[in-house]
Image: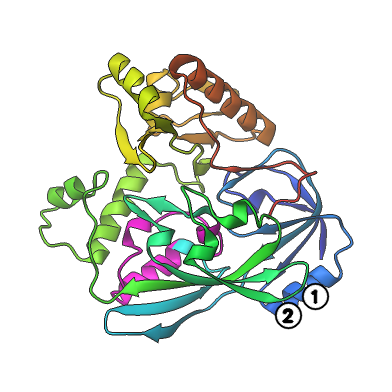
């Protein structure tokens, strides 16, 4: 157990905050031991630290999930079921599956974070979400100390949402995730610039490895490397609005990007709204909006979490005033008095 421990290396924004107490675990037994000795109040389970913004020191216990391991647990003629420890690095796991020609994760290449965080957030990119390849997960119940299994329906996946961010928030620690991957991959190349990237390389019949490489190239061209410029990827969710609101916006902005959403609604592109408002590349002090991708807020060095939070509030207010659309933060905001897993 470490005390007054810097979390700067453990969050991709590079915010220099301290945890009052810090430890890591790589087995269920170690997790139980850490929790048994926890008299420190608030508890935070840390994975890759890629989807969080610390606004102040954490006055409690931070536990870093380092449960590792990848194994095939079942298969049938079309599908292979692969279990991965929650502490595995997400991109490394994706590359491992691609190397075995197990399809389904290639569009999710280069997303920062850990395997355990992927279902919590229902991460997604380029037309694929975790729910499309998810089979089940195991999670430690904090109150009972029991391991419970959750299938896809029980996880209640939504857009960057799951039951672990809503009804079961702060009640479970995910320990492993099992994915249903395809032995005969069905390729998805129509979303974003994947098809253009493949055509530019002269690839007509891509493999999942080539799709992964195309996604990596696109992400690297648009998104800053957290190791170079602190960020947490997309800071805001793409807003979903009613047809009435969308029709009014489309009259004013005929070029507005839009995508069909459930319940006869329309999904808008948050990045487009921010850019249209003139905030792409906007900088305030030591933080700002990335010059190539308006969805990404960046720490130019030495920024405090509260500064980045205030910048996000300014963006939300600006978009509300100009478009009548409310942006929602995708990144988890962590003040020390909240108990957020």
74 shown above or below 206? below
- The reply to whether the magenta stretch includes residue 135 is no
Q: Is residue 280 visible?
A: no
Q: Position of residue 154 (x, y in %)?
A: 54, 64
Q: Nearer the viewer, residue 245 or 38?
A: 245
Q: Which quadrant holds the C terminus?
A: bottom right
The reply, left or right, for residue 119 in relation to residue 54 is left
Can you identify the residue that label 2 sits on? Answer: 29
Q: Position of residue 170 (x, y in %)?
A: 70, 56
Query: What's the residue at 33%, 53% (across, down)?
Result: 216
The reply, left or right, for residue 110 in relation to residue 308 is left
Q: Which mark is residue 33?
A: 1
Q: Residue 132 occupies which quadrant of the picture? A: bottom left
Question: Could you tell me which secondary element the residue under label 2 belongs to?
Answer: helix
Q: Position of residue 62 (x, y in %)?
A: 75, 58
Specify the segment rendered in magenta.
91-120
């Amino acid at each position: 157990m470490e005390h007054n421990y810097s979390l700067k290396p453990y969050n991709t924004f590079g915010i220099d905050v301290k945890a009052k107490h810090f430890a890591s675990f790589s087995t269920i037994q170690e997790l139980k031991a850490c929790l048994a000795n926890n008299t420190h109040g608030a508890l935070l389970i840390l994975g890759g630290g890629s989807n969080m913004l610390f606004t102040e020191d954490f006055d409690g216990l931070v536990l870093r999930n380092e449960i590792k391991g990848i194994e095939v647990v079942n298969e049938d003629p079309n599908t292979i079921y692969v279990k991965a420890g929650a502490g595995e690095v997400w991109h490394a796991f994706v590359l491992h599956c691609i190397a075995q020609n197990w399809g389904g994760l290639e569009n999710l290449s280069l997303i920062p974070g850990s395997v355990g965080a992927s279902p919590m957030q229902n991460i997604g990119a380029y037309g694929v979400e975790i729910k499309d390849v998810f089979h089940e997960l195991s999670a430690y119940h904090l109150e009972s100390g029991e391991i419970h299994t959750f299938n896809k329906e029980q996880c209640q996946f939504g857009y960057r949402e799951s039951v672990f961010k809503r009804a079961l928030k702060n009640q479970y620690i995910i320990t492993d995730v099992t994915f249903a991957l395809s032995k005969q991959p069905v390729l998805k190349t129509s979303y974003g610039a994947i098809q253009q990237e493949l055509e530019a390389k002269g690839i007509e019949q891509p493999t999942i490895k080539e799709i992964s490489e195309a996604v990596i190239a696109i992400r690297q061209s648009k998104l800053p490397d957290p190791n170079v410029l602190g960020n947490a990827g997309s800071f805001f969710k793409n807003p979903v609005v009613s047809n009435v609101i969308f029709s009014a916006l489309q009259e004013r902005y005929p070029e507005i990007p839009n995508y069909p959403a459930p319940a006869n609604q329309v999904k808008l592109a948050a990045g487009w709204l921010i850019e249209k408002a003139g905030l792409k590349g906007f900088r305030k002090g030591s933080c700002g909006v990335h010059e190539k991708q308006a969805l990404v807020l960046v720490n130019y060095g030495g920024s405090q979490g509260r500064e980045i939070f205030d910048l996000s509030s300014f963006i939300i207010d600006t978009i509300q005033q100009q478009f009548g659309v409310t942006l929602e933060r995708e990144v988890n905001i962590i003040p020390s008095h909240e108990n957020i897993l």
